[in-house]
Each structure stands twice: as structure tokens, then as C-alpha cells.
């Protein structure tokens, strides 16, 4: 009985968010941030300088750009 409640909650959560598995980019700013922007794609010196000095689209977020560069570097479908 004690394991039943967590399984029901997990099942309901999976059922509620199942449609999101087919989701793609939301067309707000993803194209401008990731598709058209090549400045975050790698760890070359000029790209690192850009990451730590840019306020692209109004925000200073070097850790986010570093994380995006790591994701891009580790991705299989460049």
C-alpha cells in the first residue's frame, strides 16, 4: 500500500506531460539565441571573450553561454 501512492503520482505526472515529448523549440527567441547565433558554439578564445562580455538580447549571462557551449560541443548532431 505504501508504494501505491508514489506510483499513482508518478503515473499521473507522466500522463500529464506525455504530450511534451513531441515538443520542439517554442518560436519566441530560440532562433535568434541558438539557430542564428554562432558565437556560443565552442570554446575558442574569441567565443569565450564574447560569452564574458556580451549582453546579447539585454542580459549578461556568461554561465548560461558556457553551458550552451558545452551542450553544443557534446552534441552529436552539429
Image (cartoon, rainbow, N blue to C red):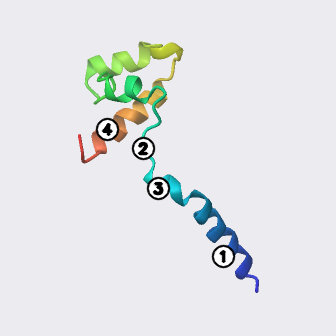
Q: Considering the numbered disc 1 on the image, is that residue within a helix, a strand or a loop?
A: helix
- Residue beneath label 2, please? 24
Residue at 71 percent across and 81 percent down: it is 4
Residue at 52 percent across and 13 percent down: it is 58
Label 3: how many Cα within 10 Å (few below 14, some 14–19, many 20+): few
Label 1 or label 2, whichever comes before in sequence order: 1
Q: CA distance from mark 3 to mark 2?
A: 9 Å
Residue 24: x and y, percent? 42, 44
Label 3 or label 1, whichever comes before in sequence order: 1
- Residue beneath label 3, please? 21
Q: Considering the numbered disc 2 on the image, is that residue within a helix, a strand or a loop?
A: loop
**Badge number at residue 54:** none
Label 4 or label 3, whichever comes before in sequence order: 3
- Residue beneath label 1, please? 7
Q: Considering the numbered disc 3 on the image, is that residue within a helix, a strand or a loop?
A: helix
Left or right: residue 50 compared with residue 12: left
- Would you identify the image quadrant in which residue 31 lies? top left
Label 4: how many Cα within 10 Å (few below 14, some 14–19, many 20+): some
Residue 59: x and y, percent? 53, 17
Q: CA distance from mark 4 to mark 1?
A: 35 Å
Disc 1 to disc 2: CB gap under 8 Å: no
- Residue beneath label 4, please? 72
Q: Considering the numbered disc 4 on the image, is that residue within a helix, a strand or a loop?
A: helix
Q: CA distance from mark 1 to mark 2?
A: 28 Å
Residue 22: x and y, percent? 44, 53
Q: CA distance from mark 4 to mark 3?
A: 21 Å
Amino acid at each position: 500500500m505504501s508504494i501505491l501512492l508514489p506510483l499513482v503520482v508518478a503515473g499521473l505526472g507522466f500522463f500529464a506531460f506525455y504530450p511534451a515529448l513531441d515538443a520542439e523549440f517554442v518560436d519566441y527567441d530560440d532562433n535568434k539565441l541558438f539557430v542564428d547565433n554562432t558565437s556560443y558554439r565552442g570554446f575558442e578564445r574569441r567565443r569565450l571573450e564574447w560569452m564574458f562580455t556580451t549582453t546579447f538580447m539585454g542580459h549578461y549571462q556568461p554561465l548560461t553561454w558556457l553551458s550552451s557551449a558545452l551542450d553544443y560541443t557534446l552534441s552529436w548532431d552539429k
